Image (cartoon, rainbow, N blue to C red):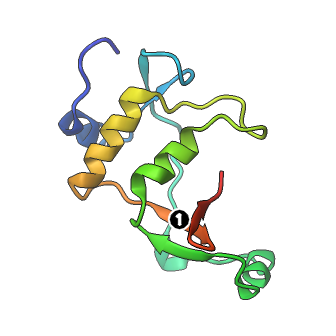
Amino acid sequence: MTEELTTSTLLTAYANGYFPMAEHQDDDTLYWFSPDPRGILPLEDFHIPHGLAKTLKKHPFTLRVNTDFEGTMRGCAEIVAKRKETWINGRILDLYIELHRMGHAHSVEAWREDKLVGG
């Protein structure tokens, strides 16, 4: 996609099942993706698997919502040993941060000892 991507265009695309991705972090080109079938998490029937429930009972971390959206996005975009590539480039990071400021993007975060953890 060569045209300038705006938050308005991104919201319209999401509503129609499309989202942008870069091939890698240093790639300025964005591509539209529309998976078939599209992944949806039905929250009304959400089930926590037994193993995860057991881990959560130990309170290894606390869950927070929207306390550090930008930090969460940057963590997801970070190259680490277990993740050698990422589809989140600078343009996508900026767009999602703006969507968050507009109230359209949210983060669920894991915190341990007042530090954002995960990845």
Which residue is denoted by mark 1 in the rendering?
Answer: 109
Residue in the foreground of this view, choosing between 119 and 23: 119
Which SS class for mark 1? Answer: strand
Horizontal side of residue 110 vs 4, given as left or right: right
Q: Position of residue 70 (x, y in %)?
A: 41, 50
Q: Position of residue 118 (x, y in %)?
A: 65, 57
* Three-letter amino acid code of the residue under disc 1: Glu
**Vertical placement of 12 versus 116: above or below?**
above
**Vertical placement of 22 versus 112: above or below?**
above
Q: Residue at x 42, y 60 (%)?
A: 68
Q: Is residue 101 visible?
A: yes
Q: Position of residue 100 (x, y in %)?
A: 30, 53
User: Which quarter of the figure is the N terminus placed in?
Assistant: top left
Horizontal side of residue 1 vs 78, given as left or right: left
Q: Residue at x 56, y 47 (%)?
A: 75
Residue in the foreground of this view, choosing between 68 and 53: 68
Q: Residue at x 36, y 28 (%)?
A: 91
Residue 111, by quadrant, is bottom right
Farthest residue, direction bottom: 57
Residue in the foreground of this view, choosing between 86 and 67: 67
**How busy is the neighbourhood of tag 1: few (under 14 within 10 Å), some, or many (20 plus)?**
some
Q: Position of residue 38 (x, y in %)?
A: 51, 46
Residue in the foreground of this view, choosing between 4 and 70: 70
Horizontal side of residue 47 vs 74, given as left or right: right
